[in-house]
Structure formats: structure tokens, C-alpha cells
Image: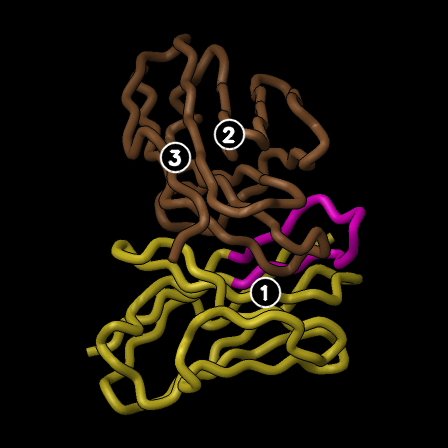
Chain colours: A brown, B yellow
Amino acid sequence: SQQGEEDPQALSIQEGENATMNCSYKTSINNLQWYRQNSGRGLVHLILIRSNEREKHSGRLRVTLDTSKKSSSLLITASRAADTASYFCATDLTNQGGKLIFGQGTELSVKP
Amino acid sequence: KAGVTQTPRYLIKTRGQQVTLSCSPISGHRSVSWYQQTPGQGLQFLFEYFSETQRNKGNFPGRFSGRQFSNSRSEMNVSTLELGDSALYLCASSLRGPNYNEQFFGPGTRLTVL
């Protein structure tokens, strides 16, 4: 069974708007990661946030983590058509790498 | 540095056959993980190999197996293929340990079982 549940399942926005995706998980984690996948290809790592961190930034990406609510959010600011992809959260229970439990993903469509 | 490579990229098999997929990790990465992606079940962890030893295993039947060689290259094998095994199989490599930051994914092998 999946560890993470993502919300929304699909999101359609205009270029320039912000996109927010949410992820909830069930068990305690060591870190949570976000990945992007274009059209059924390999996944690309976006950002990792550790369990003792609350917020992290990388370029136009902002990730928050609330361990008390077992939830995380990914915010993409000033979205571009090239951001169109599926976004997945993944939890690492071991903090050693190697085994990630993925959510079902959010399909983001950014219209020019 | 070359990325993670997977071969073959596409494969068509029939029920009952077996298949072997190959993954070459990024140079210096000793951890290789395998994932299955289907529209219905999403991305599911199959197993992880590190230093030629299976370190973690997902909830898949024994028909799914893998191994890792001394050069860190990994293979996974699926025997007695079923229609439900049709999927995108992704492998990922990483530096194992508490300071690792990400897994690097290959482009995947798309397996179709007829």
C-alpha cells in the first residue's frame, strides 16, 4: 500500500500562477522528497526535506513539512509550461536511502 | 558523469515467459533500487541492493528477483510473466547513508506482457 496520499490528483493552471500540491503520509519518517516525472519517463529529484526541518527552498520551489500532521506541501511559484509533469512525494523511513515509498502523484498542467 | 542507464528500453513478452532487465548505476553509487510503476498501483518499491546484498525488499511475489554485481550493475528478473506485470520498471542509484540526498533514476524499461 502507498505511504503517501497526494492532493489534488490533477491540477490545471495558467502560466505565471502558483501551484500547490499536498502530500500526507502515515508513519514516522526520516525525510520526505519530491520528484517530477515527465510523460512516463524517469523521475527527477526536486528537493529533500528532513524530519527536523520545517521549510526548504530551491529556486521557484518551496517545500514545507509538518510532522505533527504528517503532511508536506510543494509550492511552485510563477509556473511555466515546462513545469507540466507529474509530481510525487516519497518518504524515506530508514534515512539510509535505497527504499522510497511514493504517493500516487499530482498531475500538473500549466497552460501557456 | 553518465546517468543511470537501463536496458532494454522496451520489451514485449508473452505470459509464462521470463525477462531480465539491466541497470547500470552512476559511477561511484553502490546502492541500486528497483521500482515498478503501473497506472493502477503507482510507483511501488521492489528491492534495493547495496554491495551485492539485498538490503530492502518490497511486497512482491518471489517471481521477482534481482542481483547486483561487483561493479554495482544490477539485474532484475521476473519469471512466469503475468499480464499484470506489464509496467514501467525504474531503477535508481544513490549514495547510501544518512547524508544522501537523492536517488537518481534511469529512463525505465517498459515491459508489455501479452
In the rendered image, residue B94 lying in the magenta stretch gets the answer yes
Drawn side of residue A54 relative to residue A61, left or right? right
| Lower position in the chain sequence, tag 3 or tag 2 | 2
Q: Which mark is residue A69?
A: 2
Amino acid found under the numbered disc labelled 3:
Ala
- Give the camera-side residue of A88 and A3: A3
Question: What residue do we see at 64% from left, 36% from top?
Answer: A48
**Residue B60 falls left or right of residue B51:** left
Q: Is residue B109 above or below residue B64?
A: above
Vertical position of residue A19 compared to residue A37: above or below: above
On-image quarter of the C terminus of chain A: top left
The residue depicted at 61 percent of the width and 70 percent of the height is B56
Q: Secondary structure at mark 2?
A: loop
* Measured Cα–Cα span from mark 3 to mark 2: 27 Å
Give the magenta-colored segment's residue range. Answer: B91-106
Determine the residue positioned at 58% across, 20% down.
A62
Residue tagged 1: B33
Q: Are marks 2 and 1 on the same chain?
A: no
Nearer to us of marks 3 and 2 is 2
Residue B23 in view (yes/no): no
